Image (cartoon, rainbow, N blue to C red):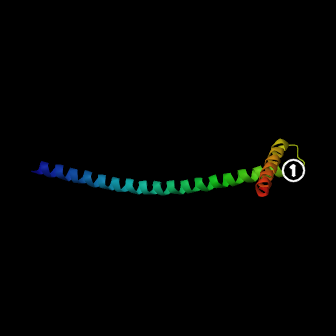
């Protein structure tokens, strides 16, 4: 019977170790989920900032072109022509 008792004790020890390891892995998993959520929030915030900065950059490019800068003159002319067409369209709609 002592052999069976030893086997049972060994199994109990192994099961206890497995339970401790599972708890440790669960804790680690929860920590990683929290870190992932934080990272996703940071990425979203940075993406929004990038979009805002791109918009500001485009606005600054147009402003520089309007101030006489030779860079991006073509883009500025195209934008102005587009705005004029939109205004003409609005005036035509109002005239009807």
Q: Which residue is painted at 26% across and 53% down in the image?
A: 15
At x 46%, y 57%, the residue is: 31
Location of residue 39 in the rendering, given as x and y in whole percent from the top left corner: 55, 54
**Nearer-the-camera pick, 84 or 58:** 84
Q: Residue at x 71, y 50 (%)?
A: 54
Q: Is 10 positioned to the left or the right of 45 in the image?
A: left
Mark 1 lies on a secondary structure that is helix
Quarter of the image that includes the C terminus: bottom right
Looking at the picture, does residue 13 appear above or below residue 75? below
- Number of labels in the image equals 1
Q: Dot 1 corresponds to which residue?
A: 66
The extreme front residue here reads 96
Q: Position of residue 27 (x, y in %)?
A: 40, 57
The answer to which image quadrant residue 23 occupies is bottom left
Residue at the far top in the pictured view: 74
Q: Position of residue 46 (x, y in %)?
A: 63, 54
- Residue found at the far right of this picture: 68
Residue 4 in the image, given as x and y percentages of width and height? 13, 49
91 vs 26, left or right, is right
Name the foreground residue: 4 vs 41. 41
Mark 1 closeness class: few <14, some 14–19, many ≥20 residues within 10 Å: some
Residue at the limit of the structure toward the left, as seen here: 1
Give the image quarter of residue 73.
top right
């Amino acid at each position: 019977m002592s052999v069976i008792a030893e086997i049972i004790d060994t199994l109990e020890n192994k099961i206890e170790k497995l339970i401790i390891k599972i708890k440790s892995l669960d804790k680690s998993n929860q920590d990683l989920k929290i870190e992932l959520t934080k990272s996703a929030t940071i990425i979203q915030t940075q993406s929004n900032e990038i979009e805002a900065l791109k918009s500001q950059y485009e606005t600054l490019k147009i402003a520089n072109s309007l101030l006489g800068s030779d860079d991006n003159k073509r883009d500025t002319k195209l934008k102005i022509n587009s705005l004029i067409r939109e205004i003409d369209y609005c005036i035509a709609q109002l005239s009807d």
